[in-house]
Each structure stands twice: as C-alpha cells, then as structure tokens.
Amino acid sequence: MNRSIGIIVLLLVAWALFTQQAPVSADKKPVLAFTPLEPGGVDKYDAGVVSQQLRKEIDAAGVYKTVEFSEIELRLAEQNLPPRCADVQTAVMIGQILGADFVGIGSIDRIGKSYAISMQIVEVRSGRIINNTSEFYKGNFRKFQTIIVPYFARKMSGLPVDEPKKK
C-alpha cells in the first residue's frame, strides 16, 4: 500500500513538473532591425546621424527592441552583404540572418529646402509591409531632427501621435 502511494505521489510530481509552462515575460518585445536610411540629397554623415537618432527614439518608445547598427554591419559583412537595403526581399533576408522579427528600410531626402523621411517596416516571417510612413518638413535640418524625427519614431512604433508643430 505504501509503495502504491509513493508511486502515485512520484507520478503526480513528475506530471506537475512536465506540464508546468515557463512564464511568458511581459516585457518580451519584438526585435526590429533597420538598416541605415538611404541618403538622397543629404550627405551620408547626416543620414547616419538621423538613422542612429531614429533607432534610439524607436527603442525608447518601448514597442520594439532595436538592433545596434554595428551589430547589423558586422553580421551582414560576415555574409558579404551591404549594410543598406531598399527592397522587401532583401529586408526579409537581412531579418533572417539577424534573427529579427521585423526589418525597417527607408530613406532621408532633401529637395530644395525641404526634407523627407520615409520608412517601411517589413515582417520577416511573411514578407508583408506592416507600416509604411513618410513625413515632409520645410525648414532647416536641425529643426527637422528635433521636431520630425521623434514624431516619426513614435508614428513608426504605432503609438498615438499629435501632429508636430512644424514652425
């Protein structure tokens, strides 16, 4: 009788251990890797500064965990791939290499005295564009950085935004 109870207790303990699921972390964020913005009419340095600022702002918004550009460049160099990307197919491939859930691709352009920033977020698993956003700003570059880039980052993160005061 005692042996039967012991076996039953052992089976119950084993069942409890094997059926217990690990707790899901509430702060598990999807990983977003995005390549530096393609410059059009702005120099590579300014495009790099805005790209880095945008990555930091998106990370700070708390929706995505972003991948550092240095890690992206290193991992892509190992595969003999350039760190920039302009099409969805390449974005998916980059996301697979990096183990990212999403990849952001985009550009920053200057047309006369106006600036434009556009970006797409591609879901790596499906190759589907889940966010496609552009913003235009007429004015100087530093105000573009301080007014439009933080606004754009929140918009790309899918957070509610108020229209920026562009003056």
Image (cartoon, rainbow, N blue to C red):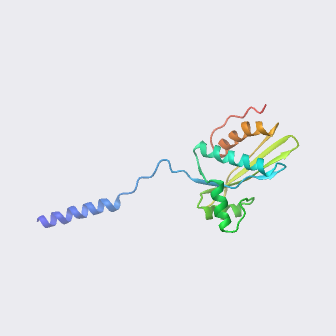
Between 49 and 11, the residue placed more toward the observer is 49
Residue ID at (79%, 40%): 141
Q: Which corner quadrant holds the N terminus?
A: bottom left
In the image as oriented, which residue stretches furthest toward the right?
112
Total number of numbered discs in the rendering:
0
Residue 84 x %, y %: 73, 59
**Residue 137 placed where, x, y %?**
80, 39
Can residue 144 be seen? yes
Identify which residue is drawn at 71% across, 49% down.
Answer: 51
- Check the image and name the residue furthest to the left: 1
Looking at the rendering, which quadrant does residue 123 occupy? bottom right
Q: Describe residue 13's horizontal placement relative to residue 40 as left or right.
A: left
Q: Is residue 11 above or below residue 52?
A: below
Q: Nearer the viewer, residue 131 or 136?
A: 136
x, y percent for residue 145: 74, 40
Q: Residue at x 68, y 65 (%)?
A: 77
The front one of 107 and 52 is 52
Q: Give the side of residue 114 with respect to residue 153, left or right.
A: right
The structure residue drawn at horizontal position 62% and vertical position 64%, both measured from the top left corner, is 97
Quadrant of the image for the C terminus? Answer: top right
Q: Is residue 157 visible?
A: no
Residue 153 point in image, percent of width and height: 67, 43
